[in-house]
Image (cartoon, rainbow, N blue to C red):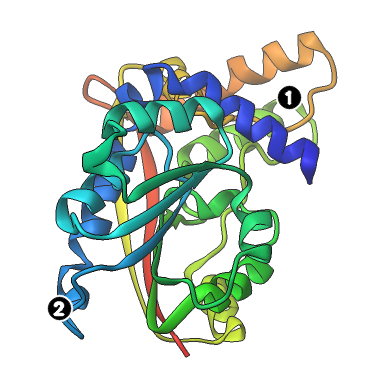
Amino acid sequence: MCDRKTGIGRQFSRSANGSYDVHARVQRNMAKLLASSLKQWTKKGDRDELSILEIGCGTGKLTELLKKEWPNASIIAIDMAPAMIKAAEERIGLGPTNSRIHFLLGDAELWAANAPASSFDLVISNACFQWFSDPKRTLEHLERLLRADGLLAFATFGPNTFHELHTSFDEAYQALGTEPQRHGLSFLSADQWREYLIEAGFSAIRQKPIAWSEKYPSVRDFLYSVKAQGASASEAAQNGRNVSRHLFSAMYKAYENRFSVPGGVKATYDVLFVKASKG
């Protein structure tokens, strides 16, 4: 797990210096919708000074929205990529006016396992939970960190994300007469997340799926954008340089044949918004 997490941290650190914010359009929209969905909840109990834990803060877009909505909240924002933490600090601007915001470099799964119980009113995360190595156990830790009547809110990617890419790779493998391999992450379904949440002790679980279709000038531009966001579009092992070149050439052709739109190609982001209460 450590080697995998180290690799993920390096990927996102490389993307933090400008390229992430340029290409992460979907993630920005996710952050806005996630933050706005909480306004009605915070009216309950008249909470003026929330204690918030943000997991996977990235370059600080969601942190900025949280600060704007709840200026008196205490926020701990954690990320495992040093360059992301630096970018978030620069976005927020550390100083006396932001003394209630603390950025923490670390692996949220390991940190949550050892953090004090009943420490937060709200645990929130945008486009991060899909990277968890042990989501079931981590949800148990997060439930323990919440105070009574606390809320977990997160947005993550569902299994239909980039279905065009996976379909095109399958066709490419078939065209080359080789056994298909999975490229990229395998995402949990809404039903799987619900099951894990119930087992962790959460209740009043609300889920809202949204499918975003993004257009890119070409398949190559799409893959470059995904890489610039810190994610690897292809993690399957390749059996030599020539096979890899032929495979990607066949994938490009299949993608363009099946998923072209005026001006380029499309790619689907299957987004799941989840809110769950403690106990």
Left or right, 176 with respect to 199, comes to right
Which residue is found at the position 62% from the left and 54% from the top? 132
Amino acid type at circle 1 is: Leu
Q: Secondary structure at mark 2?
A: helix
The residue carrying mark 2 is: 43
Number of dots carrying numbers: 2
Residue 22 appears at what percent x and percent y?
31, 22
Between the C-alphas of marks 1 and 2, the distance is 58 Å
Q: Is residue 274 above or below residue 2?
A: below
In depth, the one of 228 and 103 nearer the eye is 103
How packed is label 1: few (under 14 Cα within 10 Å), some, or many (20 or more)?
A: few
Please indicate whether residue 7 sits to the left or right of residue 266 in the image: right
Residue 231 point in image, percent of width and height? 54, 32
Q: Report whether 235 appears left or right of 58.
A: right
Estimate how packed mark 2 is, as few (under 14), some (14 to 19) or many (20 or more) residues with alpha carbons within 10 Å.
few
Upstream in sequence: badge 1 or badge 2: 2
Q: Nearer the viewer, residue 187 or 130?
A: 130
Residue highlighted by disc 1: 176
Comparing 102 with 144, the one in front is: 102
